Amino acid sequence: MHASAQPRPADQHRPYFFLSYAHTPRYGAGGPDPDMWVERLFRDLCGHVMAMTDLPAGAPAGFMDREIRSGEGWSERLGEVLASCRVFVPLFSPRYFASEMCGREWYAFEQRTIQHQAYTNRPAEAIVPALWVPVPPEQLPGPAERLQFNHRAFGDRYVTDGLYGLIKLRIFAEEYERAVYELAKRIVSVADATAIRPGRHVDYRLAPSAFGAAAGEGPRPMHVTVAAPTRHELPEGRDDAYYGDSPLEWNPYHPVSARPLALVAEDMVRSLNYQTTVSSFDEEVLHLDGKQPPSRPEVLLVDRWALEDEDRRARLAAFDAEHRPWVSVVVPWNRDDQQSRASEAELSHRLEETMPSKMRQGRAACRAAAKGVPSMEAFGQILPQVVEAAAQQYLRHATVYPPAGGGHTERPRLVGPMGTDFGTTQYIPDRLDHAPDAEETDDSQS
């Protein structure tokens, strides 16, 4: 065997799977532990995985949160395993998708799959769902609904009753054994096929939930607009390796990233359970009357080199002059792009002159994003905060629709395209100061 094909020592200590499940409350004082059945499933899966692989003695086949030792920091430990495990196994149940903690675990792992695809330009389908209690398709949030997974391969009884039904009833013992065996086979095959690389440790306490809006509300709208030139309209001497035939093919983090940034951003925003659309700034006819109520929140990705075109620069300046706090600006740039580094002072000054309002808008995270995001990793860290800021500003400025049925109401509630109750949007603290800025409560600074 070639040396490069052998498992690295660090890989031997990475769990094959992370079992993500919703804790069931104990029924009655002194009652049995309801999660004992999940632990049995976990042990059974680990046994199969050890038999199907060459994991050495003592290496973890899987992980569930009961593995955290007393006195160990649970957040740090969860973040560590989510950054290193090879496959994520969510146990579907109605309680699972109502759990913010489970949504955070899903989000933290999915960022690794998005980053992996950005680096390799190959899909990384490393989430293997398991049915604990069957959930009607219409009740699945976007991230779960998008998974392409054939549960019937594990047996018809598994689909109708879930693992909980099979494990609780002795008459289904054979069906349970088959389903667990097939699940373990799928975990091992997916882990070996995707070979997803370890990722950055996520601060689990600050991670948003992948399920976004409350259960049953469905995905919320979010638009991503790209202001960048094509490779045919670059200023003289500019390296065209970062560009394509369309602004949407702009790849500022080349060669580390193998995918256009618009596609990476679309995946990242969608992972927050937003219904995401993408377009070029040059094609958008959205710079009309800034006094009109917004139709959606937006993230505008700006290439500083796009301002070399005077017509585009004038349109960006006109856009900046409108009061659109529901549009957050992100300025990606590559610290390894020698041309951008050499021209950084000039490019930054031109952007400050063109879009002074957006450069000073909103939270600390938004202002940092507008000043420049120097790497793909930094982009993945800051984009969720910028997206949430845009969504909150949209809720503050969107048209309010009174409840259906007419009649008087003292406090109309927003029932527009972002959900049924906009007062519950989650706030994600900025990593810089962990609190909203003063500007956030002042529309004149938004």
Image (cartoon, rainbow, N blue to C red):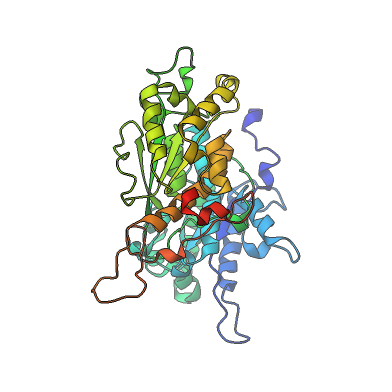
> Is residue 404 in view from this perspective?
yes
The answer to which of 418 and 289 lies nearer the viewer is 289
Residue 323 picture quarter: top left
Identity of the residue furthest to the bottom in this view: 29
Residue at left offset 56%, top offset 70%: 23
Image location (x, y in percent) of residue 102: 53, 61
Residue 92 vertical position relative to residue 321 in the rendered view, above or below: below
Residue at left offset 65%, top offset 65%: 66
Residue 57 lies left or right of residue 317; in this view the side is right
Identity of the residue furthest to the front in this view: 444
Image location (x, y in percent) of residue 16: 60, 50
Residue 1 vertical position relative to residue 339 in the rendered view, above or below: below
Q: How many numbered marks are there? A: 0
Image location (x, y in percent) of residue 314: 38, 28
Identity of the residue furthest to the left in this view: 405
The answer to which of 298 and 75 lies nearer the viewer is 298
Q: Quadrant of the N terminus?
A: top right
Residue 278 vertical position relative to residue 272 in the rendered view, above or below: above
Residue at left offset 57%, top offset 44%: 381
Residue 287 vertical position relative to residue 101 in the rendered view, above or below: above
Residue at left offset 56%, top offset 65%: 41
Image location (x, y in percent) of residue 260: 44, 31
The answer to which of 274 and 388 lies nearer the viewer is 388
